[in-house]
């Protein structure tokens, strides 16, 4: 999942289906502070993001005392989810897009997202360019899920902390002989104040959850 403003890759999930992977993403976001509900989401028309949102953030309504007690989770007011669906002809040629408001009004969703997913499409291209494991019809695909997750984590770290993006640069007003101040997505998101080096990345100690072996 990518943040629109900073272009930060905020979360990544893995699963046998897009629903499982999306649910993993939403669980990460929930652990990181989105406990009240999902952030505004825009996606294409594929996958099970709607089902994943319900699984992670949905709630079962309280029993009113009449009829059968509710058992299925339902979305809460305030959710915002927009699908931008590509339309193609019988030969697969791209014709245009159709937007569908899954949660929220179309006016609210247009104000948040606009009418394009170009930044997401560019993000997918960047991932496939920097990671041969994601190249379609290639021989470098991952044969082990653990190795694939490790490669994806390294790719995300490089993208977020090391690779400056032209669309995020700031006008330096000719200070220090520079016209532009380059920034990475992590800098734009306020997670760091400088562009990291590979030495910083590989010398960083990652503190993870401790698991009991006894």
Image: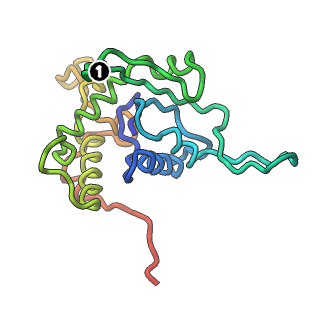
Q: Nearer the viewer, residue 17 or 121?
A: 17
- In the image as oriented, which residue stretches furthest toward the front? 90
Quadrant (top left, top right, bottom left, bottom right) of the N terminus: top left
- Residue under the image location 46 percent in, 77 percent down: 212
Q: Position of residue 117 (x, y in %)?
A: 37, 24
Q: Is residue 106 left or right of residue 182?
A: right
Q: Position of residue 187 (x, y in %)?
A: 34, 36
Image: 211 above or below 65: below
- Residue under the image location 30 percent in, 28 percent down: 121
- Residue under the image location 24 percent in, 60 percent down: 147
Q: Position of residue 125 (x, y in %)?
A: 23, 33
Q: Nearer the viewer, residue 18 or 182?
A: 18
Image: 147 above or below 6: below
Q: Which residue is mark 1?
A: 90
Categorize mark 1 by other alpha carbons within 10 Å: few (<14), some (14-19), many (20+).
few
Q: Is residue 52 left or right of residue 155?
A: right
Image: 54 above or below 80: below
Q: Nearer the viewer, residue 68 or 142?
A: 68
- In the image as oriented, which residue stretches furthest toward the left? 139
Q: Is residue 67 left or right of residue 33?
A: right
Q: Quadrant of residue 166?
A: top left
Secondary structure under the numbered disc 1 in the rendered image:
loop
């Amino acid at each position: 999942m990518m943040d629109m403003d900073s272009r930060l890759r905020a979360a990544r999930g893995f699963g046998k289906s897009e629903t499982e992977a999306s649910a993993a993403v939403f669980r990460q976001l929930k652990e990181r502070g989105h406990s009240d509900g999902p952030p505004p989401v825009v996606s294409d028309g594929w996958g099970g993001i709607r089902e994943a949102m319900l699984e992670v953030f949905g709630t079962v309504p309280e029993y009113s005392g009449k009829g059968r007690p509710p058992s299925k989770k339902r979305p809460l007011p305030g959710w915002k989810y927009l699908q931008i669906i590509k339309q193609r002809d019988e030969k697969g040629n791209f014709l245009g897009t159709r937007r569908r408001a899954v949660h929220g009004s179309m006016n609210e969703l247009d104000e948040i997202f606009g009418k394009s997913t170009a930044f997401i499409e560019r993000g997918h291209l960047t991932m496939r360019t920097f990671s041969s494991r994601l190249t379609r019809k290639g021989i470098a695909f991952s044969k082990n899920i653990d190795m694939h997750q490790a490669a994806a984590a390294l790719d995300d770290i490089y993208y977020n902390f090391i690779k400056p993006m032209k669309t995020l640069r700031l006008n330096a007003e000719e200070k220090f002989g520079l016209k532009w101040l380059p920034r990475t997505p992590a800098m734009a998101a306020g997670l760091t104040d400088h562009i990291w080096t590979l030495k910083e990345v590989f010398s960083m100690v990652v503190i993870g959850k401790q698991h009991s072996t006894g």
